[in-house]
Image: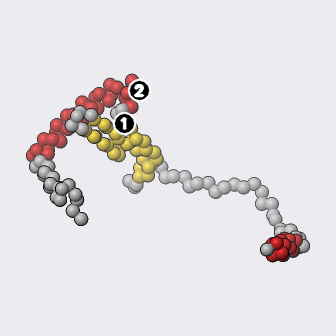
Amino acid sequence: MYGKSLVALALMSVAVTGTKLGPPPVVWDLGPFEPTPAPTPAPAQKKRLITTFTLQNSPGGDTVVTFEATEVAEDKDGKTRTLASKQYSLAEAEEKPELRPLARKILEQLRTLEGDLLEFVEKSGPPKPRAPLTGGGARPR
């Protein structure tokens, strides 16, 4: 084993020294590097909208409201691209007193909307009762 590694080492040193026998590669100095600039985006209108909204109520009265605001750029052809987005929660009002009045106002408006939604459900048809579980609570396979 020791003899094989010596032979391998000798072959590697011959290979390395063999490449150093000739002149070095030709290298041209081309001057300073100037990267190609990114293309200038087409003129667009910056817009902000609420893209998702989640309201979670529990029968015990707890309510969690979260939403996402997204900023987009809309070009003259109506194509949009997302610039930025961020998740928010009305729970932030607990940490930032300046948000409390606005959070209260939003919750009051949500309660009005919930009433309208429940009226819609009543007129459209109430939810269907869930089918009972079969086989002692086990799911059918």
Residue at (27%, 34%) from the top-left corner? 62
The residue at the point 77 percent across, 57 percent down is 31
Residue 123 image offset from top left, x and y in percent? 9, 46
Q: Amino acid at mark 1?
A: Ser
Residue 133's x, y, as percent?
17, 55
Query: How many badges with numbers are in the image?
Result: 2
Is residue 17 shown above or below 94? below
In depth, the one of 137 and 112 nearer the eye is 137
Whether residue 12 is visible, yes or no, is no
Q: Residues within 10 Å of mark 1 (few under 14, many from 20)?
A: some
Image point 18% across, 56% down: which residue?
A: 136
Viewer-nearest residue: 78 or 50: 50
User: Do the residues under discs 1 and 2 have CB atoms within 8 angstroms?
Assistant: no
Q: Where, by quadrant of the figure, is residue 86 drawn? A: top left
Residue 89 has which mark? 1
Q: Amino acid at mark 2?
A: Lys
Task: Name the mark on residue 60.
Answer: none
For residue 96, the mark is: 2
**Residue 32: % across, % down:** 75, 54
SS assignment at label 1: strand
